[in-house]
């Protein structure tokens, strides 16, 4: 379908703003998984929170149009996005070094659903990248929806210079199989894979203190070895993570000496070296 001269001019202007915006962002980190429910958004927000806590100017983009959870995890789900007279979107300020954008901030209620097909979703993601006043950032963390469909593909096409991607998985065989598909997806799009991060890797018995492998053990590490990519660590199951996530509290900041914080800090350090 051919565009009219007016449509073409509008498209060129959007592309110009997109390029200008992305040019102000030093590192772009892509967080994805091929299976839902593995804790990808927790990982994305934790990385953003720790990076900001270490002094990096950080933004987090929730690219999960249908199931946005970044705003809730950051405790800003009641804060709407504001738009200037020039149609520039102001991101939500979480703290001095962290801003966020999510479709959840466009909805009147958390129960509202977005029923859109591919072109509309791609248009929104493009607008979030081109028309949001991200400013100069050291790091933009993009939380992708599960799978390798419209949104992840759109992100990879809209951000041609993604610094790296992290694949989040859990120890079960089915999740590990899906993580391999994610790595294949990234390889085909020539997006560098920083590594595999295993979430929900087990928990400590509250009575005896012994480890309990609820799902399996070592699956993420094995998959990373087979694929020839780094293994970034194992995040255990912790009821306090669930509680903090439900309440929109920053678990990694409140547990600044904990195991999860150390894993996230190490990843942030790796990203800054890219």
Image: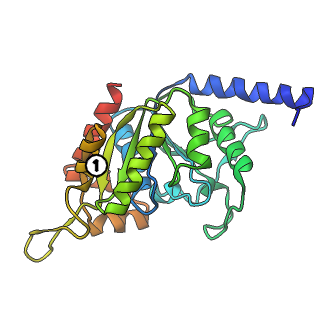
* Residue that label 1 marks: 223
Instruction: Indicate whether 13 appears above or below 173.
Output: above
Q: Position of residue 200 (x, y in %)?
A: 29, 62
SS at badge 1 = helix
Residue 139 falls left or right of residue 90: left
Residue 262 falls left or right of residue 140: left
Whether residue 35 appears in this view of the structure is: yes
Residue 107 falls left or right of residue 253: right
Q: Residue furthest bottom?
A: 207
Residue 184 falls left or right of residue 71: left
How many numbered marks have been drawn onto this rendered protein structure?
1
Colour basis: rainbow
Q: In the depicted view, which residue is nearer to us: 196 or 139? A: 196
Q: Position of residue 243 (x, y in %)?
A: 35, 68
Quarter-wise, where is residue 4 in the image?
Answer: top right
Q: In the depicted view, which residue is nearer to us: 181 or 5? A: 181
Q: Residue at x 62, y 71 (%)?
A: 111
Q: Residue at x 58, y 42 (%)?
A: 153
Q: Position of residue 103 (x, y in %)?
A: 63, 53
Instruction: Locate the C terminus and report the quarter of the image it occupies.
Output: top left
Instruction: Indicate whether 26 appears above or below 110.
Output: above
Q: In the depicted view, which residue is nearer to us: 75 or 121? A: 121
Q: Residue at x 32, y 56 (%)?
A: 251
Q: Residues within 10 Å of mark 1 (few under 14, many from 20)?
A: many
Whether residue 250 appears in this view of the structure is: no
Instruction: Locate the N terminus and report the quarter of the image it occupies.
Output: top right
Q: Position of residue 162 (x, y in %)?
A: 49, 30
């Amino acid at each position: 379908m051919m565009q009219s001269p007016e449509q073409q001019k509008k498209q060129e202007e959007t592309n110009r703003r997109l390029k200008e915006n992305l040019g102000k962002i030093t590192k772009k980190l892509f967080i994805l998984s091929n299976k839902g429910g593995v804790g990808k958004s927790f990982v994305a927000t934790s990385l953003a929170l720790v990076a900001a806590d270490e002094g990096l100017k950080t933004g987090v983009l929730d690219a999960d149009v249908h199931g946005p959870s970044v705003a809730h995890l950051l405790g800003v789900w009641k804060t709407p996005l504001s738009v200037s007279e020039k149609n520039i979107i102001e991101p939500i300020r979480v703290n001095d070094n962290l801003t966020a954008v999510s479709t959840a901030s466009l909805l009147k209620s958390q129960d509202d659903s977005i029923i859109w097909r591919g072109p509309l979703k791609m248009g929104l993601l493009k607008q979030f990248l081109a028309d949001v006043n991200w400013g100069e950032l050291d790091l933009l963390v993009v939380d992708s929806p599960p799978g390798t469909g419209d949104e992840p593909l759109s992100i990879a096409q809209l951000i041609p210079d993604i610094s790296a991607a992290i694949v989040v998985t859990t120890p079960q065989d089915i999740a590990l199989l899906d993580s391999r598909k994610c790595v294949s997806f990234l390889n085909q799009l020539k997006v560098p894979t920083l590594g595999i991060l295993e979430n929900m890797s087990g928990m400590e018995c509250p009575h005896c203190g012994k480890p309990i492998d609820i799902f399996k053990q070592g699956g993420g590490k094995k998959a990373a070895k087979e694929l020839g990519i780094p293994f970034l660590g194992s995040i255990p199951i912790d009821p306090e993570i669930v509680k903090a996530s439900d309440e929109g509290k920053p678990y990694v900041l409140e547990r600044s000496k904990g195991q999860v914080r150390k894993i996230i800090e190490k990843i942030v350090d790796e990203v800054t070296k890219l």
